[in-house]
Amino acid sequence: MAVLVLVWDDLFEDPQLTDPEAVTALRRGMVAMLRQDPERPWRSGAIPTAWASLWPRLREGRSTRWQERFLDNIEEWFKACEREAHHRINGYIPSTADYLPLRMSTSGIETIIASVEVYRDRELPAKLRDHPVVRRLEELICWVGFVENDLVGLDRDEADQVPYNLVRAVRHETGCTRSAAIEQVRRQGAEQRAQIGEVIRYLPALFRVLPGLSGKWKQDMSIYEMMTSMALGLHQAERYTPPSHSAVPDLERLRNEIYYPADEPAPTAP
């Protein structure tokens, strides 16, 4: 699932994708793929085949509510990726106030949390996910992870005109120099990272007193510890610091296997 998340993200972020109609056709195809019958995949390409193989294993043992929420969240994520691609094509850079909600919408955070739930064989209770302290932790984890990725990938983001990079947003909003924007973002990142530690130290006490966790608070705690480790270490991945000799995937070939133009007949319903 982690590999698919990264590939799906790359399909939309590819700077070679410059046709707005193709962006929308990609999003429509991705949604159709998501809702396909695993026994009768709508497309025969690599990504639809991978999803048809993975989804039955992901949903095994999961509640119907979990399955519906999982698919709905991925569909919303695809819509956010479509919007980001249009913003990239149009040259739009958001304000610093809009940065976090836009970045979170395109991060697939809900899909990542659900995937960790599968890995840990535990569904986080709604009352836990909705708690303001937990929501704040999720925002902090995302913010720090995003900003550290923005900093390490700044050169590439500038070259590719990636719209949701906080350094670019600060420069666009304030007119300051590149170095000044980098310093401001680094300072904010350090402050937010310190807050993550403070919230995590508070979580065990919170989880122990929340009613209805059935003594599973340690399992829930382990999910957030795992998410934190993943988010704060992602900027070190090759995805953000690729070596010069790395092979470039043929993203357009993969997209051609998924595109669903508006004038194409609808796929057969499951």
Image (cartoon, grey):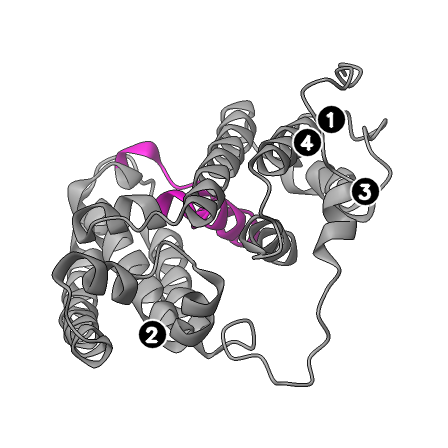
Helix, strand or loop at label 1? It is loop
At label 4, the amino acid type is: Gly
Q: Which residues are magenta?
A: 104-127
Front-lying residue, 83 or 178: 178
- For disc 1, the neighbor class at 10 Å (few under 14, some 14 to 19, many from 20) is many
Residue at image position (36%, 51%) is: 220
Helix, strand or loop at label 2? It is helix
Q: Which circle's residue, 4 or 3, is located before the other in the chain?
A: 4
Front-lying residue, 145 or 116: 145
> Between tags 4 and 3, which lies in front?
4
> Between tags 1 and 4, which lies in front?
4
Q: Which residue is mark 1?
A: 36
Front-lying residue, 171 or 222: 171
Give me the C-alpha separation between circle 3 and circle 1.
11 Å
Magenta: main secondary structure: helix
Q: Which residue is mark 3?
A: 49
Rendered image: mark on residue 29: 4
- For disc 4, the neighbor class at 10 Å (few under 14, some 14 to 19, many from 20) is many
Residue 212 seen anywhere in this rendered image of the structure:
yes
